[in-house]
Image (cartoon, rainbow, N blue to C red):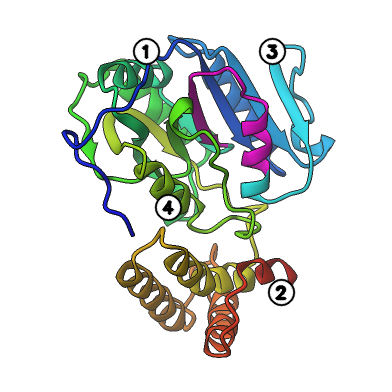
């Protein structure tokens, strides 16, 4: 895999970003989405465009669709939905992707614009997640909002960027001119497992990818509506191999990640967390391993399990 450029390696022809869009893929979380959109609308620098890529009307029930939010409908799948949102963002300089359960600091848009304006070779930037419900039973909106209000009450000073850190899908921004022609890989179905690493690696071939500690937010990690254990377990095995072959994930990283997931699912299936289907994930791991041994590297098969 090509090594990401260092700060001094190269400059890209990047005018100062003037316009910004927030793009959100959603499915089955209308109440949380409403909270997320309220935070986006309350930014100190309001986005020029807000796009929600949904799968059906039920995804956006209760939202004020006359508030300037553009909603697109189409097939489910994180990569498909993000690509639909991308297609609506022509003419926008800076593209921000938030998960539909990510609560963004009110300074997020203002600060990300400043970072891209200050670093013309920056193509992708991700923020610091103050708390990540993916690693637990999840965080309620009420708790997340309280945590965010506390941090925004004493905002961080602008921090130096940490280069070489790829984007985390729940909160990431890209310079539109630098990702022209790139799309999220729709062979990664459903939840998209590692789609952010794949897209970030492609962007890194065109400039700098980094993280900024002063771009803060809370990832609720809302569990209902997520992928079944067996399907996710399959993706945990097949997606890393697929991306290693594609050249966007180092084979050593892929092997380490696969091993970590197999061991965790095997050991914890004996006394699983209530919010994780460890037995299902382990079954999916085993199906994925069997497919790999047969030379079958087809990440889209997860959607059929």
Q: What element carries label 1?
A: loop
**Which mark identifies residue 68?**
3
The one nearer the camera, 208 or 136, is 208
Q: What stretch is highlighted in magenta?
A: 81-99
**Which mark identifies residue 86?**
none
Distance from Cα at disc 2 to Cα at disc 3:
38 Å
Position of 298 compared to 165: left or right? right
Q: Earlier in the sequence, mark 2 or mark 1?
A: 1
Q: Do the residues labelled 3 and 1 touch (CB within 8 Å)?
A: no
Q: Earlier in the sequence, mark 1 or mark 4?
A: 1
Q: Which of marks 3 and 1 is nearer the N terminus?
A: 1
> Where is mark 4, residue-wise?
197
Q: Compared to 248, does 200 lie above or below?
A: above
Give the mark toward the camera: 2 or 1. Answer: 1
Q: Do the residues labelled 3 and 4 touch (CB within 8 Å)?
A: no
Q: Compared to 221, does 147 lie above or below?
A: above
The one nearer the camera, 225 or 204, is 204
């Amino acid at each position: 895999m090509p090594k990401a450029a260092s700060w001094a390696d190269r400059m890209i022809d990047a005018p100062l970003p003037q316009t910004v869009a927030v793009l959100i893929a959603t499915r089955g979380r209308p109440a949380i989405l409403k909270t997320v959109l309220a935070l986006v609308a309350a930014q100190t620098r309001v986005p020029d465009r807000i796009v929600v890529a949904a799968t059906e009307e039920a995804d956006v029930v209760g939202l004020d669709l006359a508030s300037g939010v553009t909603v697109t409908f189409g097939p489910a799948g994180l990569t498909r939905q993000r690509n639909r949102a991308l297609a609506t963002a022509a003419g926008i300089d800076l593209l921000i992707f938030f998960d539909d359960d990510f609560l963004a600091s009110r300074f997020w848009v203002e600060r990300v614009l400043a970072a891209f304006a200050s670093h013309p070779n920056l193509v992708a930037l991700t923020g610091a997640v103050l708390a990540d419900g993916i690693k637990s039973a999840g965080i309620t909106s009420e708790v997340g909002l309280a945590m965010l209000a506390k941090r925004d009450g004493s905002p961080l000073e602008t921090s130096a960027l940490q280069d070489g850190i790829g984007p985390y899908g729940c909160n990431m921004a890209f310079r539109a001119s630098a990702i022209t022609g790139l799309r999220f890989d729709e062979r990664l179905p459903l939840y998209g497992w590692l789609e952010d690493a794949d897209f970030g690696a492609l962007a890194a071939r065109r400039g700098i990818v980094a993280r900024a500690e002063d771009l803060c937010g809370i990832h609720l990690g809302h569990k209902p509506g997520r992928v079944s254990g067996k399907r996710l377990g399959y993706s945990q095995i097949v997606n890393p191999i697929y991306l290693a072959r594609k050249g966007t994930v180092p084979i050593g990283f892929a092997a380490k990640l696969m091993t970590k997931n197999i061991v965790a699912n095997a050991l914890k299936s004996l006394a699983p967390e209530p919010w994780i289907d460890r037995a299902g994930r382990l079954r999916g791991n085993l199906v994925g391993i069997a497919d790999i041994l047969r030379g079958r590297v087809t990440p889209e098969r997860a959607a059929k399990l």
